[in-house]
Amino acid sequence: MKKIAIYGREFNISVLPYVQTLFNFLNSRGIHLLIVDDFHDFMQENSIHYTNYETFNSNSQLENDIELMLSLGGDGTMLSAVSIVGNSGIPIAGINFGRLGFLASIQKDEMIQSLEDIFRGEYK
């Protein structure tokens, strides 16, 4: 079973349907999630549903078998995710729910196809 860490911050509620779509996709793939505490709280407050998860609040709690971290937000969120991953070697993919998306380069309209590509090993 794949394990993916999820990092995010509060964002505009207009993107919540995209976030639910993302979690529906991850749940359908049987992926085990490690979700940062603060973001988990935000998603619970906004009725985002998901299963098969744990929460974490520091990089020392990231497990060795995490295959990927998803950063959900904009470029600032991506930079924060990098600081959590540190030198662990965990790759990070950023899904842009912000405005510009220079670092968080996966656009919300393309996130499912992009993740399918990542899971197949078809990425740069």
Image: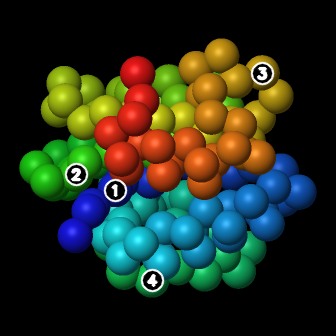
Residue drawn at (59%, 74%), measured in percent from left and top? 24
Q: Is residue 50 above or below residue 91?
A: below
Name the residue beneath numbered marker 3.
Answer: 100
Asked if the residue under mark 3 is in contact with the one under mark 2, i.e. CB atoms within 8 Å, the reply is no
Amino acid under label 2?
Ile
Q: CA distance from mark 3 to mark 4?
A: 31 Å
Crowding near the residue tagged with mark 1, few <14, some 14–19, many ≥20 C-alpha atoms within 10 Å: many
Q: In the depicted view, which residue is nearer to us: 37 or 109? A: 109
Mark 2 lies on a secondary structure that is loop
Amino acid under label 3?
Leu
Name the residue beneath numbered marker 4.
Answer: 51
Name the residue beneath numbered marker 2.
Answer: 66
Mark 3 lies on a secondary structure that is loop
Amino acid under label 4?
Thr
Residue 89 lies left or right of residue 76; in this view the side is: left
Give residue 4's mark.
1
Mark 4 lies on a secondary structure that is loop
Amino acid under label 1?
Ile
Q: Is residue 56 at least partly visible in the picture?
A: no
Give residue 71's position: percent from left, percent from top. Answer: 51, 41
Residue drawn at (50%, 48%), measured in percent from left and top? 115
Give residue 47's position: percent from left, percent from top. Answer: 70, 80
Q: In the depicted view, which residue is nearer to us: 20 or 81? A: 20
Q: In the depicted view, which residue is nearer to us: 31 or 56? A: 31
Q: CA distance from mark 1 to mark 2?
A: 6 Å
Which sits earlier in the primary sequence, circle 4 or circle 1?
1
Mark 1 lies on a secondary structure that is strand
Asked if the residue under mark 1 is in contact with the one under mark 3, i.e. CB atoms within 8 Å, the reply is no
Q: CA distance from mark 2 to mark 4?
A: 17 Å
